[in-house]
Amino acid sequence: MNQANIQLPSYITSAVPNPSNKRAPWYTNTAPTYAGIFLWFVFWQDAVNAPNQGGLLSQGLGWALISLVLAALVCHFLFYLVPGMLGMKTGLPLYIVGTSTFGSTGGFLLPGFLMGLLQFGWLGVNTFFAAQALGVFFGLESSSAAVKAIMVIWGVLAAFVGLKGIQYVAKVATYLPLIPIAILLLLLAKTIGGLGTFDASKLVELHKQVDASAPAALSAFGVLAVMMTYVVGFFATAGAAGVDFGLNSRDKKDVSMGGIVGVALAIVLTAGISVLVVAGTYGNPELSKTAVEAGKGKLILQSTGLVPVLMAGKGAGLIMFLLAVAAFPPACFSSFIAANSFKTTLPNVNPFISVGIGAAISIILALTGLAGKAIIVFNIIGASFGPICGAMMVDYLLNGKTWSGPRAGFNPAGWVSWALGFVVGILPILNIYPVPAAPVAAFIVGTVVYFVAAKAGMLTPVVPLPAKKA
């Protein structure tokens, strides 16, 4: 194939790298932005929550925390670091950099269009849990018509602001992350006294007594696998978006430190405190008894679910209200990212129409309760972006740790690796096969298949792009 005759789409040829004078240290952009993602209560509230007896504390507090640290390291080293380096070295955004893996035509869909599409899944999750939190504040039943009305209003407002007024939300969002930090520390202060007497075996036995139908306790490997699914699945899209963070980094140190602090450390601190809160609650006999009574036949293992147990009077409602307020900017940012993605991949479609349809789907997911099944949502996202991150990493390494440039058309190696990785990642959701740590398994499959396909010659030619120094 004559490379000279291959025409690149204008969105690639018109791309201009982010110049060095517009880049900044890791502690002013990458780290705080990523940390803000993990401060979202929807991430950290379920760090222990699993239907199995004892949840993710069944093998002890120490192992739960070790599993969390390992999951955080996987996020940093396997899902974030290479995309971050690609962004830093090229100065170009994800939808451009991804064309080396999926092709100049295929890059429209992967990761471009898919990134926008999955943002509506996040908007649905945000809408569901924010409405539930506001329901606690207003004293409403979680399944009431009033809570469902809040879901509709929340989803519509977030989509509209994401389209038109994101600059105002961004200003407020600078300070809102202080709310979940303060709440986490408050909950820890309320429960820290029970940590010394926490006994995993007693928690497992208590779970049996409270809910006889609960599945058997997870093994040590089971705890690690579920923690990986939970944390890595949540982070998968943000990992690929490391390209967009990296293009604002000055050098390798900025990329590395931004991930270590903003990703790995933030995961361990936010979810780690949540784990401690649950363990401390059930390590305190008085709080444990109150939690069992509040659970009404179910053992509460969600840290925000324990808020009414730990806070007297109207304090619980106020905390949930504040967490909902702090969750609004992430909802708007999801809409904003989706809108930008659709403007690029569907340039002839009015973004109000494309985002409006997506927002409607988000609201339906919230109203039906599907968006409330966090592990399933994380699995879908992990299955979708795990192989993308894996394929991008191999492409980067095979090209000598540089960006090759856009490949022509649809690059078969990228698409085959994504398809097979996605199938493996989605198997547990379809109840076909219980793949452990499915998002990580999807990443591994994507990595191996891309390597084999590349070595087998399943790569379309690289189309030369005029060098543009950042």
Image (tube, rainbow, N blue to C red):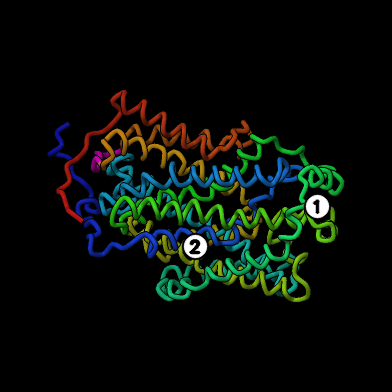
Answer whether residue 414 is visible to the viewer in this image.
yes
Mark 2 vs mark 1, CA separation in Å: 31 Å
Q: Quadrant of the N terminus?
A: top left
Query: Badge 2 is on which residue?
Result: 36
- Please tell me whether residue 447 is drawn above or below residue 250 in the rendered image: above
Q: Which of 286 and 351 is in front in this view?
A: 286
- Which residue lies most toward the left here? 4
Which kind of residue does numbered mark 2 sit on? Gly
Q: As displayed, is residue 181 above or below residue 111?
A: below
Q: In this view, does 58 lie to the left or right of 448?
A: right
Dot 2 falls on a residue whose secondary structure is helix
Nearest the viewer among 451 and 65 is 65
Residue 391 percent coordinates (x, y): 38, 37
* Magenta region, main secondary structure: loop
| Residues packed near mark 1 inside 10 Å, few (<14), some (14 to 19) or many (20 plus) | some
Q: Which of 125 and 156 is in front in this view?
A: 125
Q: Can residue 345 be seen in this view?
A: no
For residue 335: magenta?
Answer: no
Q: Mark 1 points at which residue?
A: 298
Q: What element carries label 1?
A: loop
User: Which residue ends up furthest to the top in the rendered image?
Assistant: 456
Instruction: Write the residue at 29% across / 33% down.
Output: 398
The magenta region covers 404-410
Residue at 80% over, 57% down: 284
**Residue mark closest to the camera, 2 vs 1:** 2
Picture quadrant where residue 269 is located: bottom right
Q: Which amino acid does label 1 sit on?
A: Lys
- Where is residue 122 shown, x and y percent of the image? 53, 56
Residue ID at (23%, 56%): 17
Q: Quadrant of residue 149?
A: bottom right
